[in-house]
Amino acid sequence: KQEVTQIPAALSVPEGENLVLNCSFTDSAIYNLQWFRQDPGKGLTSLLLIQSSQREQTSGRLNASLDKSSGRSTLYIAASQPGDSATYLCAVRGNTPLVFGKGTRLSVIA
Amino acid sequence: GAVVSQHPSRVICKSGTSVKIECRSLDFQATTMFWYRQFPKQSLMLMATSNEGSKATYEQGVEKDKFLINHASLTLSTLTVTSAHPEDSSFYICGTGQGPGAGNGEAFFGQGTRLTVV
């Protein structure tokens, strides 16, 4: 059974800092990995999708990497802003629907 | 990306009543949609997979008679929480039907529904 772990559970940083969120998964037989953002009480916004054959994807200040063999992914956020404050969820898709981690709650302090 | 609209965003109901949550795909045809539940500070847990024109597939431990799922068209899936109890209070969210091998597999989700049973 696939399990997804995200570390840290919470993170507080000053504005402008670069940061890395970590995601690990137990079964490396995945089709893809997706990072989402969730604001309090809201739905999920898709940030980045990495196919199993890819090693990284970039969108603006976000960069996600994937090391499928070791079961790890990182989400790098450059020059963080208060508007980046949210919970970031990692999810993997294999032969089952998406399996989510518990998320990392990020606070960017102005 | 694809647009998924979920309604209502928030609902409060009395214990014993039923609540229907709608999930619509606005710009694509979804043969499969997924329903998740999220408790505070927990990850999203898959409840069931909704299949257009056929019965839903429920995850282990999810009561199919309590959580009725209907996927009558390619753009609408509904989740009905029957005889709701306070322990059913949670955040329910639906996602697109990007099953294994379907397209590039990117998943999109609705805005979620906060259900409070009093």
Image (cartoon, coloured by chain):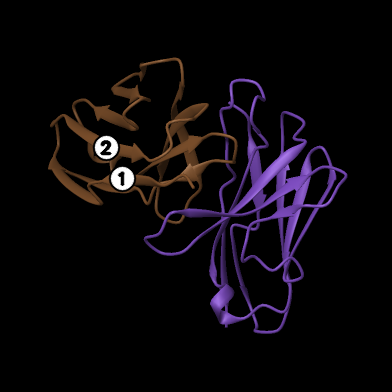
Chain colours: A brown, B purple
Tell whether label 2 touches label 1 (CB within 8 Å): yes
- Image side of residue B10 versus residue A86, left or right: right
At 72% from the left and 29% from the top, the residue drawn is B27
**Residue pictured at 59% horizontal, 35% vertical:** A95
- The reply to whether residue A87 is in sight is no
Residue B17 appears at what percent x and percent y?
72, 80
Residue B50's place in the image compared with B68, above or below, is above
For the residue pair B101 and A107, the one nearer the viewer reads as B101
| Image quarter of residue A55 | top left
Q: Is residue B29 left or right of residue A102?
A: right
Q: Are marks 1 and 2 on the same chain?
A: yes
Whole-Å distance between the Cαs marked 1 and 2? 6 Å
Q: Which residue is drawn at the image coordinates 41% and 64% (left, top)?
A: B40
Quadrant of the rendering where the C terminus of chain A is positioned: top left
Question: Residue under mark 1: which chain is it in?
Answer: A
Which of the numbered marks, if any, corresponds to residue A6?
A: 1
| Residue annotated with mark 2 | A22
Residue A99 location in percent, x, y? 49, 44
SS label for mark 2: strand
Q: Is residue B99 left or right of residue A91?
A: right
Q: Quadrant of residue A82?
A: top left
The front one of B37 and B109 is: B37
Q: Residues within 10 Å of mark 1 (few under 14, many from 20)?
A: many
Location of residue A74 by image quarter = top left
Q: Which amino acid does the dot numbered 2 rest on?
A: Asn
Check the residue under mark 2 and report the chain it is in. A
Asked if one can make out residue B42 in the rendered structure from this viewpoint, the answer is yes
Amino acid at circle 1: Gln
> Which numbered disc flags the more N-terminal residue, 1 or 2?
1
